[in-house]
Image: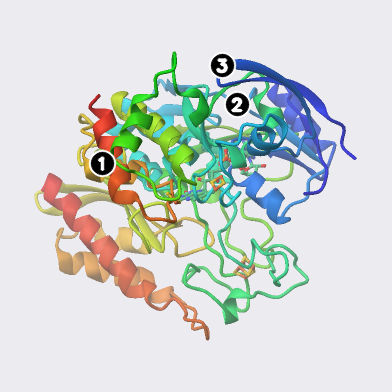
Amino acid sequence: MKPFTYARPSEASEAVAALAADPDARFLAGGTNLLDHLKLGVVEPSQLVDVNRVTSTAIEDLPDGGLRIGAGVPNSDLAADPRVRERYPAVAAAILAGASGQLRNMASTGGNLLQRTRCVYFADPTTPCTKRDLSQGCSAREGWARYHAILGTAADGCIATHPSDLAVALVAVDAQVQVLGPDGARTIPIGELHRLPGDDPTRDTVLAHGDLITAVDLPAPTPAVRNSTYRKVRDRASYAFALVSAAVALEVRDGTVADVRIALGGVAHKPWRATVAEAALRGRPATDDEFRAAIAAELDAAEPVRSPLGGNTFKLPLVTGTVVSTLRGLAGGTA
Amino acid sequence: MSTTIPLTITVDGEPRDLDVDPRTTLLDALRDRLGVTSTKKGCDHGQCGACTVLLDGRRVLACLTLAVAKDGADVVTANGLATDGELHPVTEAFLANDAYQCGYCTPGQICSAVGAIDEARQGMPSAVTSDLTGEVTLDRTEIAERMSGNLCRCAAYVNIVSAVEEASRA
Ligand SMILES: Cc1cc2nc3c(=O)[nH]c(=O)nc-3n(C[C@H](O)[C@H](O)[C@H](O)COP(=O)(O)OP(=O)(O)OC[C@H]3O[C@@H](n4cnc5c(N)ncnc54)[C@H](O)[C@@H]3O)c2cc1C
Ligand code: SF4
Ligand code: FES
Ligand code: FES
């Protein structure tokens, strides 16, 4: 590990200023992703700015019936909060489906959203990776692409997926991310926080250097959000990242889909809001045939990877099965 | 070179002063600087749970924790669980149920189990809790899920689950 200095400011503005003054400084929250990457040599910061004293660990009620989650709230506390479990079940379920008890105690809300991809080539500085270094190629396209993207990919570009389970659920409930940057505070809809790789896969999000996530706001829960869940499919039953996951919210009235939200994990560089499927379902009968047709329409644009080491075409039926069975389960609960 | 930073951490009930390079993990500080070797290094990347300790009462991974960030913290390792010469009920249950083979993962398993039982008592749900808003009953499925962050290369899992089950009823 390259040497670095350590600072623990007591004001958020100080933390932001520290990064603004040093392009090689990084924020440290729970450290569960950053420390791993320091050991692997994926990042080599000059300075770690510990944000644990400047980010809130409180979950507050908002006047509109929503919740404000401090960026420092540990993942375990967020999943255990009675308000979250009751009003935003997909959010609690998504967190609980991720990592381990120890990691969830350590991981922060802000850090979780900004964790980097688990692409094995990204984590190994001895292999070429465009996300680490724009001048290099992508090793995954001709390599181990089992965990990689099928949607939103660009020709020859990065096919990494975003690994956060929480982020997928937050996209389904339309959360808002509160950010403090060198130029002041702003709000970013969670669906616009993460980006597609385009021509700069080194950037996972729209945040600039020095932007600090201070909180995540959940809007007041709609009937669909109250009837939501998270389904994660993985290679082992626990303590594994998603091959495919779905955060789904559904409101059925008189057998008809009144409202639906579908966000997919494990399929793209960002949590993927399945807007095509949602539009196809609204106002339609809540039946398996309709569910299947809607997700098929969403997957029309999919471009699975066929690599010599086994690609990820299996994700097409896996996404379909996951979404259809999750919608069916939720329809059973409200119909 | 980075300079060292002084800090004080309470380890198994005793305040310990040390100067650390900012790169030092809590795991390396415990083992190499303070001689507390019950906390094991398995993967050093958060993937095995061998380094699990209780930090301010909660189970965490010492290998992904920077010592400098924990100035003033209270750390309990498997060594420090006993009180007045009496083994902790979880440690007792591991012995009674033969919940280990080589024993390398065991101190981490025991600390993790103490944390997991406490989390369940507080009503914190897990991925296999059928009703997210209901009560938590620590059955074998719940225990296996809550202990999934602790790998055992010897695969003593069946008896580990039994030990945690017994301890949780104590
Ligand atoms: C073995 C293992 C298994 C895992 N399994 C899963 C899983 O199944 N599902 C899942 O979702 N996750 C999983 N994780 C990842 C884990 O959830 C993340 O590492 C964690 O959420 C990151 O949070 P942190 O607070 O530790 O972030 P850190 O490691 O401290 O930071 C991560 C990044 O975010 C930046 N950052 C942190 N806080 C802020 C802030 N407030 N504002 C701006 N930037 C910030 C840091 O600079 C850094 O770049 C796993 C991790 C491990 C090690
Ligand atoms: S998929 Fe992205 S992260 Fe993985 S090797 Fe290719 S460029 Fe790197
Ligand atoms: S040594 Fe810390 S998790 Fe393996
Ligand atoms: S007893 Fe040998 S690793 Fe668990």
Mark 3 secondary-structure assignment: loop
Callout 2 environment at 10 Å: few (<14), some (14 to 19), or many (20+)? many
- The quarter of the picture where residue A15 lies is top right
Subunit of label 1: B
Considering every residue shown, the one lying at the far right of the view is B1
Subunit of label 3: B
Q: Amino acid at mark 1?
A: Ser
Q: Is residue B64 above or below residue A320?
A: above
Mark 1 secondary-structure assignment: helix
Q: Residue B13, image x and y in percent? A: 56, 16
Q: Which residue is mark 1?
A: B162
The reply to whether the residue tagged 2 has its Cβ within 8 angstroms of ligand 1 is yes
For the point 65% across and 32% down, the residue is B30
For the point 71% across and 45% down, the residue is A208
Mark 2 secondary-structure assignment: loop
Q: Which residue is mark 3?
A: B13
Tell me how far mark 2 sits from mark 1, CA to CA.
Answer: 40 Å
Which residue is more in the foreground, A23 or B12?
B12
Tell me how far mark 3 sits from mark 2, CA to CA.
Answer: 29 Å
Q: Residue A141, image x and y in percent? A: 58, 78
Callout 3 environment at 10 Å: few (<14), some (14 to 19), or many (20+)? few
Q: Which residue is mark 2?
A: A55
